[in-house]
């Protein structure tokens, strides 16, 4: 079963709503200390299932959530990237988390670009943010490659309210202007 929602394609990736079949990859990513460090910390399979189910639930009740990212060449689940806005979130976020096997391939920028286009074009968002830990240099590089800038310190809702984050982002107008130049 896959949650209801659209499927997007890029040159190398398929972005689709979360499905039960994604649990193995999701649980592997969340069990990896480095991969999960900035996205909630290490989790066992049962807690990973709850995270996956939360994403699928958002697709069902809000009409959007992070997409499962599937590598076209292998069919492997390689991460979750896309729009995310739980209750009391600091804004309309497009976030990312990749399985270590997908690191260093440019997948975060490729998938986030498609997700941001979709958020602005389909969801009608006027602004996109990325909640990034000040120590997460890799995500800061992704944000910069997307054209986002650091807007300063932000705050997450409980239970993450004590974690330090910076809010990176850009407006729809900034995104469209940058896309027109390419």
Image (tube, rainbow, N blue to C red):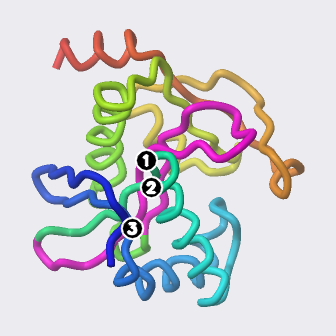
Q: Position of residue 34 (x, y in %)?
A: 60, 72
CA–CA distance between discs 1 and 3? 10 Å
Q: Which disc is residue 95 wearing?
A: none
Residue 153 shows in this picture: yes
Where residue 156 sits, quadrant-wise, is top right
Residue at 66% across, 82% down: 47
Decide: few, some or many residues near mark 2? Use Cα within 10 Å; few <14, some 14-19, many ≥20: many
Where residue 71 sits, quadrant-wise, is bottom left
Label 1 sits on a secondary structure element that is loop
Residue at 77% across, 30% down: 153
Residue beneath label 1, please?
A: 64
Circles 2 and 3: CB atoms closer than 8 Å: yes
Earlier residue among tags 2 and 3: 3
- Horizontal side of 96 relative to 91 (left or right) equals left
Q: Which disc is residue 59 wearing?
A: 2
- Horizontal side of 58 relative to 91 (left or right) equals left
């Amino acid at each position: 079963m896959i949650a209801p929602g659209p499927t997007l394609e890029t040159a190398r990736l398929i972005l689709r709503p979360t499905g039960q079949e994604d649990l193995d990859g999701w649980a592997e990513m969340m069990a990896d200390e480095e991969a999960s460090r900035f996205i909630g910390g290490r989790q066992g399979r049962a807690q990973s299932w709850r995270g996956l189910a939360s994403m699928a639930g958002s697709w069902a009740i809000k009409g959007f959530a992070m997409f499962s990212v599937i590598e076209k060449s292998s069919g492997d689940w390689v991460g979750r990237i896309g729009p995310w806005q739980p209750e009391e979130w600091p804004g309309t976020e497009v976030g990312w988390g990749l399985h270590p096997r997908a690191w260093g391939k440019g997948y975060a920028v490729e998938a986030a670009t498609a997700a941001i286009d979709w958020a602005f074009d389909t969801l009608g968002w006027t602004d996109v943010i990325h909640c990034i830990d000040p120590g997460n240099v890799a995500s800061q590089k992704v944000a910069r490659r997307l054209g986002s800038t650091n807007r300063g310190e932000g705050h997450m809702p409980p239970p993450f309210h004590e974690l330090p984050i910076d809010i990176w982002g850009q407006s729809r107008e900034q995104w469209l202007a940058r896309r027109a130049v390419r």
